[in-house]
Amino acid sequence: MSISVTARRKARGGKYSAANGYRVSAKTPWGNPIVYFFALILVAICVTPVLYIVLGGFRTNSQITVNPSGLPDPWVWDNYLAVVASDVFWTELGNSLIVAICTMVGVVVLGIMVSFVIARYRFKYAPLMYALFSAGLMFPMTVGITPLYLMIRNLGLSNSLAGIILPQIAFGLPQTIIILVPFLQSIPMELEEAALLDGCSRLGFFWRMVIPLSMPGVATVGILQFVGSWNAYMLPLFVLSSSDNYTLPLGVSMFSSEHSVDTARVLAFTSLAMLPALICFTIFQKKIVGGLTGAVKG
């Protein structure tokens, strides 16, 4: 009799507990549908503007005027081809790559060295240094843009890519240190002691053990700094005055002003400008999430 009752309850779904005599409902493999519903809404809010810009570049101005939310009919490639054939686009692309790569390298190199000192050296000012860099997150570049510009001008770095790279490295260090310090603190002290007993110096331990073990965090901060530098607009706007030194975000703004009546070409230029950062973030998003998760656990 008990077997037949158990069989009927299993047929209805779920698991049967012989000890307590009740049915435990089985979890659905897809999880909570309400969570997926709101997640799809958020994805649609984020993706829709990007799709509109990309598809808008394949339309003509008359198509956009008649039906702003429609699909390209027919598809027009002239807007993208005109942007790609322009020397201005490639000059601004090269400037953006130089600024983004130099900023990323500078932040990663300086950030991991400072984080190593704070995380692995025992001295009374280590918590104070960490708190000082943490406070840097509460001081955005927007607040200090005027004195920052005056300092850049006095140093003779105005209208140069170096005038953008150096401040971006300085403002990127707090976030980098906040992420990397937990990674370096999670490395066991026994591992460092064993390396020292084997004759490895602190610098050798840093190169041979610390950097390989902290690569998830290094990849995370590197990608975040690259994308942030690529999308930077305010600092180039204040520092750069020559069109030969424009980065892509500033170039998009100037291109929109010059071709305000050619909406389709402006959308094509904007799509190509945001494409490298979008591809970089899409490819390495798992490393970003994994690095941030490791920082929280550490």
Image (cartoon, rainbow, N blue to C red):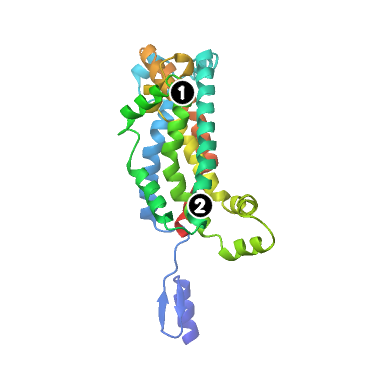
Q: Which amino acid lies under the numbered mark 1 shown in the image of this protein?
A: Leu
Query: Residue, x 55% and y 50% (percent of image)?
Result: 216
Furthest residue to the front?
124
Q: Quadrant of residue 196?
A: bottom right
Q: Nearer the viewer, residue 209 or 48?
A: 209
Label 2 Cα crowd, 10 Å radius (few <14 / some 14-19 / many 20+): some
Viewed as shown, does residue 232 lie left or right of 95? left
Q: Which mark is residue 117?
A: 2
Q: Secondary structure at mark 2?
A: helix
Residue 45 locus on image (x, y percent) = 36, 38
Residue 243 locus on image (x, y percent) = 45, 14
Query: Residue, x 46% and y 50% (percent of image)?
Result: 179
- Quick check: 239 above or below 1? above
Q: Nearer the viewer, residue 16 or 134?
A: 134
Residue 294 locus on image (x, y percent) = 50, 55
- Quick check: 187 above or below 60? below
